[in-house]
Amino acid sequence: MQTKEDKTFKVLGNKVIIDLRGRLCETPEELLQSTLFRHLLAIAVDGLREKQSPLLEIFGNREPDKKVLENLSELLSLLSRVPADLLQGKVEYADEFIKERDLLNDFVEYLYNFWRTYDRFIILNSENDVLDKRPYRTFNESIENLTHLVRKTYREIQKNLTGKVPRVYRQVTAGAEAAAIALPKDIPLPEGEYQKLKNIPVVRQILLNPPLILNPPTNKRGGKFEKVCRNPLEIITISPDEYLCYPAKVGPLIVMVYFHHRFLDRGMSLGNLST
């Protein structure tokens, strides 16, 4: 399973989790020069290698190593604001990519769709800003802007490559599909092993962009359940940065549901239980 972590994002299998403690990109240049974009670009190219895709011909005889992919990322950044005609003969590495414009345009289309194959989440986790009291500002100005930015970047690159303005615009969800404000909360917990759950952020607000179609991992059980004589919390290690807690109201009770980021799609779906 592909796993990538740094301070601002995680890639866990088919999930991309963006931590909003790091500032979201605000311009096409920031988006295309971001660590997340370059990481996903490398994964996308590896996938094309496995399929022996003709799209790899945009690299010519060059091996798409780290330096070549950096050049491609910089070229796409330039194409987000400058027509391809103005780059030929003026940017050293541009000519090799631009000589097959239709192929490069197909590659950009592939990248855009590749990004959208992931389940995309944003987690807002900050103790210095009362985010849960300003969800409208937080969600609209950060999360909605990300969707517009991704679509705008994709369309500007294609326009500057082909010289044509699209006649039909597909307003698909290109940013985050779901987001949550999760902040620390002082929850009374029993002494002992339950103190491991103390610092796990608690979900305060959830944003879902319908229609929300997620692809959770299969849940096929084999074997049988066996009784254990110890509390499972005694024998596991919990990293608070890898978990969230959803407080579900079940009748007169509040059930604190703790889940790992690998099951973020299922955890976010608990929001459908709320009114």
Image (tube, grey):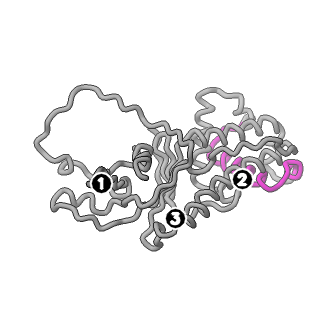
| Residue 77 belongs to the span the image colors magenta | yes
Identify the mark at residue 74; answer none if there is no mark.
Answer: 2
Relative to 241, residue 134 above or below: below
Query: Which quarter of the rendered picture does the N terminus lie within?
Result: top left
The residue to which callout 3 is attached is: 135
Labels 3 and 2 touching (C-beta < 8 A): no
Give left or right: position of 113 versus 193.
right
Q: Residue at x 47, y 40 (%)?
A: 13
Give left or right: position of 126 versus 88.
left
Percent across and percent down for residue 84 are: 85, 48
* Secondary structure of residue under mark 1: strand
In the image shown, does 89 or 116 lie closer to the viewer? 116
Q: Residue at x 56, y 48 (%)?
A: 209
* Secondary structure of residue under mark 2: helix
| Residue 108 belongs to the span the image colors magenta | no
The amino acid on which the numbered mark 1 sits, given as a three-letter code, is Met
Percent across and percent down for residue 113 are: 65, 39
Q: Kindly report the distance in space between the C-alpha atoms of the residues bearing marks 3 and 1.
A: 22 Å
Q: Residue at x 58, y 28 (%)?
A: 50
